[in-house]
Amino acid sequence: MSTFTFLIIGKNDNPLYEIEFPITVQKKETYVHQYIAHGSLDIVEEHVWKSNNMYLKIIDKFNKVQISSFVTAGHIKFMLLHEKKDEDAIKNFFVEVHDLYLKILLNPFYEYNKPITSTAFDAKVRKIGTKYF
């Protein structure tokens, strides 16, 4: 079974949101995925300046884990750690989560670049994740 870890990283490289698909992933694997994502942040920064696209595709690999990235206009990074390569599903996932993220930004009670604690956002991301993965 493939595992997917999705992270939203803030402008100052601070974590804003994290979720894993399926939910039954062990804690040890969670820490490894966080380490891999943190190690890939510099590569995302390099790719941002080389491309005009928001979707950066696969930017890095670590053993069997591949890292795909999507960067918003405000330099918020969406990162997905995955084992199987399905570019269309990953791109569609990023686009739908980006739409949800824009709705969070429009909320007057949300502070920009702060962790996302909305249960509605979490439920919708889970629904989108099960749709594509």
Image (cartoon, rainbow, N blue to C red):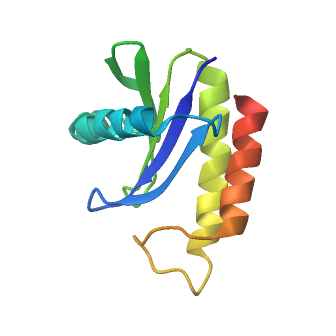
81 over 112 or under it: above or below: above
Q: Is residue 27 visible?
A: yes
Give percent across and percent down for residue 114: 42, 72
78 over 67 or under it: above or below: below
State left or right for residue 38 relative to residue 64.
left
Q: Residue at x 50, y 35 (%)?
A: 26
Instruction: Assign the C terminus to one quadrant of the image.
Output: top right
State left or right for residue 104 relative to residue 75.
right
Residue 52 occupies quadrant? top left
Residue 60 or 31: which is nearer the viewer? 31
Residue 62 occupies quadrant? top left
Instruction: Assign the N terminus to one quadrant of the image.
Output: top right
56 over 86 or under it: above or below: below
State left or right for residue 47 relative to residue 94.
left
Q: Residue at x 40, y 61 (%)?
A: 74
Give percent across and percent down for residue 4: 55, 31
Give percent across and percent down for residue 113: 39, 70
Residue 97 or 49: which is nearer the viewer? 97
